[in-house]
Amino acid sequence: FKVAIDCIILGFDKQELKLLLVHRTIEPAKGQWSLMGGFLSQEESLNDGAKRILFQLTGLEDIYLEQVYLFGDINRDPVERVISICYYALIKLEDYDEELGLSHDAHWFPIKARPELIFDHEQMVDAALYRLRRRAGYQPIGFELLPEKFTMKQLLSLYEAIYDRDFDEGNFSKKMLSLGILFKTNEK
């Protein structure tokens, strides 16, 4: 069997969470929407393989990357037995190399309006969103999707997009400020 790595690449456009998808270039399911992925080489670790795949598609290094789950259903790939390790990455859209992405036929989609995905990629996205939501509840990883300087309103919009629900603005601000991780700049 083969070992694959599939990457769920997430970005935020100040209003909604986005997912980067590619058109699959090989059969089966050629031309359908897919996560970016590839096979692990014998000479690389899982994390190095995920970093390689992300760099090939985005041109970015040193981005937030987390392993989500191992997908190993016997029939997950109709051609051969493939075990896939799923990762998610958080990238700032302004850092993304649009030309490089287009060379891979990659396109951003709102997470809530994504097209149908091949094989078990939908399950992978759901698992990554579950992990992101859990992690964002106790660790400020959402900041990876914002510029260095941002407003409280932008932070609120990000967390509403991650959790797919509205928060009370006053309570949210109070909670975030109580963590002691934000610095007021007095800039407009």
Image: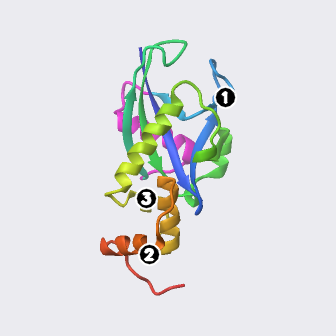
Residue at left offset 51%, top offset 53%: 164
Residue situated in front as seen by the camera: 26 or 15: 15
Answer with mark 2 or mark 1, whichever residue precedes in sequence.
Answer: 1
Magenta range: 40-62
Label 2 vs label 3: CA separation? 19 Å
State the SS at label 2: helix
Q: Quadrant of residue 50?
A: top left
Query: Does 52 appear in magenta?
Result: yes
State the residue in front, 109 or 165.
165
Scheme by which the image is coloured: rainbow
Find residue 30 and report its image quarter.
top right
Verify CB contact (< 8 Å) between mark 3 and mark 1: no
Q: Which residue is mark 3?
A: 142
* Disc 1 element: loop
Q: Are marks 2 and 3 in contact (CB under 8 Å)?
A: no
The dot on residue 170 is 2
Q: Is residue 61 magenta?
A: yes
Residue drawn 37% across the image and 39% down it: 67
Q: Quadrant of the C terminus?
A: bottom right
Q: Looking at the rendering, in which quadrant would you find the N terminus?
A: top left
**Location of residue 126 in the rendering, given as x and y in whole percent from the top left corner:** 47, 38
Residue 163 located left or right of residue 131: right
The answer to whether residue 100 is visible is yes
Distance between mark 2 and mark 1 Cα atoms: 43 Å
User: Taking 142 as reference, is 54 above or below it?
Assistant: above
Name the residue tied to disc 1.
Answer: 32
Q: Up-down: is 168 above or below 52?
A: below
